[in-house]
Image: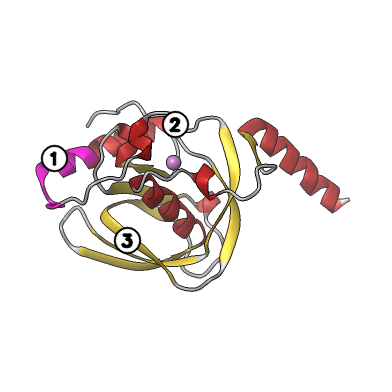
Amino acid sequence: MTSKSIVRVGDPVLRSVAALVPDPTAPAIRQLIDDMVASLEEAGGIGLAAPQIGILQRVLIFWVPDARATNEPDDGPCPLTALINPVLEPLDDRMALGWEGCLSIPGLRGEVPRHLRMRVTATTPEGEPFEAIVAGTRARVLQHEVDHLDGILYLDRMTDFTRFGFTEEVHEAEAERRSRELT
Ligand code: NI
């Protein structure tokens, strides 16, 4: 497996719609997933979509580390998972705000409204059907990555650009806000 460089915002590939994968068990898809895993490991982050390494195929990988999981039912830590041809369906109208970054928009963060709970259906790399209810961080990362398959970036989903900035500045401002709330 080979780590690929991550495509950055401005490249038209990030604004293109990725193609359905006709054969999820094809060796080329196995190779693509291996390359995505290597790329995510090198770049750091909790999710990656194939267009981010320049491949317009409907493939994503994600994981949720302990520290990132919320207390929502159907959230929680989960190991690295690859999904092919994923489809998301909101389970109700509830939305949640949360901070997101993107490996294709390095150094920046924004607060993004996302559906709280979704049903995800997909195919696994073994060719098996996959279905799950996801919430919290699991739902957020999947919405972010499926958006990449449709040429959508988290910036497009933002509603308040006063909640956007460089990671360092945003963290400082958030820490300050929290300490003011405590005093
Ligand atoms: Ni992203």
Ligand 1 visible in quadrant:
top left
Amino acid type indicated by mark 3:
Val
Q: Secondary structure at mark 1?
A: helix
Quadrant location of the N terminus in the rendered image: top left
Instruction: Locate residue 176, reporting x and y percent.
Output: 79, 41
Numbered tag placed on residue 87 in the rendering: 3
> Count the marks: how many?
3
- Tell me the residue at 30%/67% (across/down): 131
Q: Secondary structure at mark 2?
A: loop
Q: Is residue 29 magenta?
A: yes
How far apart in space, not on screen, are marks 1 and 3 (Cα)? 21 Å
Q: Secondary structure at mark 3?
A: strand
Numbered tag placed on residue 9 in the rendering: 2
Between marks 1 and 2 in the image, the one whose residue lies nearer the viewer: 2
Instruction: Locate residue 147, reporting x and y percent.
Output: 40, 49
Judging depth in this view, the residue of 6 and 125 nearest the camera is: 6
Instruction: Locate residue 179, reporting x and y percent.
Output: 81, 46
Judging depth in this view, the residue of 26 and 88 nearest the camera is: 88
Q: How busy is the neighbourhood of tag 2: few (under 14 within 10 Å), some, or many (20 plus)?
A: some
Left or right, 66 with respect to 53, comes to: right
Q: Is residue 107 magenta?
A: no
Dot placed on the residue nearer the N-terminal end, 1 or 3:
1
Numbered tag placed on residue 28 in the rendering: 1
Judging depth in this view, the residue of 138 and 17 nearest the camera is: 17
Report the magenta residues as a range.
22-32
Amino acid type indicated by mark 2:
Val
Q: Is mark 1 within 8 Å of ligand 1?
A: no
Instruction: Locate residue 143, reporting x and y percent.
Output: 43, 55
How far apart in space, not on screen, are marks 1 and 2 (Cα)? 26 Å
Left or right, 135 with respect to 38, comes to: right
Eyeballing the image, is 35 above or below 142? Answer: above
- Tell me the residue at 34%/26% (across/down): 5
